[in-house]
Amino acid sequence: MDRLLVIGATGLIGAKAFELGLQKYETYGTYAKNKKEGLLQLDVVDRRAVFGLFGKIRPDVVFDAHGINSVERAESHKDDAWAIDFEGSRNLMDASRQSGAKYIFISSDLVFSGTKAVYTERDRPDPVNYLGRTKWAVETMMDIFDIDHIIARTSGTYGRMSRTGKKGFPQFIIENLHKGVKVKAATDQYATPTLVDDLVRSVFVLISANAKGIFNIAGKDCISKYDFAKAVCREFELDDGLIEPCGFSDLQQLVRRPLRVKFSTGKLGKYVTEKPVGMKKGLRILHGMLSSSEYF
């Protein structure tokens, strides 16, 4: 059985990769600061620690889901963002190449400005914020390293996650509305909701097929944050009157974001029979997975 090493196994995507990986691989996972039983501590910036762990585990596949997820934090702490997201990934790539492991990098729609109607894997990135630039820098570095890799570009990931972990947009809506807190949602900022289970399963199919290169992995629907919030209310029977429509500029965000990135997933369809589901079905699946104690 191949060995899978999941970097960042306490985050939304990494936790799902660790969970599903146990079904088909000899699976190991790491955490940076949020200690979790069964996982190994790793500071990806510490090159010696990275190579030491790789020497012990000797992974065949490295699923890299680590990194700063906050656009605001990356913009205000650029040195940290570069060290963690770029330098850390470089260490992981170098160790993967030395050990002959396939390297999986989870990228983002943030590598694009959102000025095109539809983005394919061939489109040149043009990020508008620092987090997007670090993602693009890592993508570019893979060509230099000449490493066996998959870049999974995704958007709007959501799924089941405990209170201590990063939550997707639906759980943010659910928790606030249950408390009676009004939530503003932009009518001119679009997302492509992607169920994290679909993202990870698609990546595993690509690994099994020995696929290489960039793949867009995203849900079927590209909808406004406002419409997404309303859909969450319908599925979870919440008061949608607490959702206030607004323009993105009204949110007074300090960091620029792409307002609309829609991915073409035609390339993914050549490998994956069941591509990521649409928003409505995804929310229904999420509802079935969540217990009341997890979102109330």
Image (tube, helix red, strand yellow):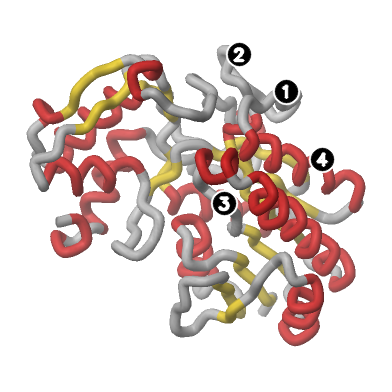
Residue 175 vs residue 48: left or right? left
Residue 116: give its label. Answer: 2
Determine whether label 1 and label 4 are within 8 Å by CB.
no
The residue mark sitting in front, 4 or 3, is 3
Amino acid bearing label 4: Thr
Q: Which residue is mark 1?
A: 123
Q: Is residue 260 above or below residue 68?
A: above
Q: Is residue 51 above or below residue 87?
A: below
Determine whether label 1 and label 2 are within 8 Å by CB.
yes
- Residue depicted at x 28% and y 45%: 172
> Please, what secondary structure does the residue beneath circle 1 have?
loop
Amino acid bearing label 1: Asp
- Residue depicted at x 46% and y 62%: 16
- Residue depicted at x 70% and y 35%: 133
In terms of sequence position, does the residue under pointer 1 or pointer 2 come before the other? 2
In terms of sequence position, does the residue under pointer 3 or pointer 2 come before the other? 3
Residue 127 or 75: which is nearer the viewer?
Answer: 75
Q: CA–CA distance between discs 1 and 2? A: 10 Å
Find residue 46 and report its image quarter.
Answer: bottom right
In terms of sequence position, does the residue under pointer 1 or pointer 3 come before the other? 3
Q: CA–CA distance between discs 1 and 4? A: 13 Å
Residue 211 or 86: which is nearer the viewer?
Answer: 86
Residue 141 vs residue 110: left or right? right
> Please, what secondary structure does the residue beneath circle 4 have?
helix
Q: Which residue is mark 3?
A: 68
| Quadrant, the N terminus | bottom right
In terms of sequence position, does the residue under pointer 4 or pointer 3 come before the other? 3
Q: Which residue is mark 4?
A: 140
Determine whether label 4 and label 3 are within 8 Å by CB.
no
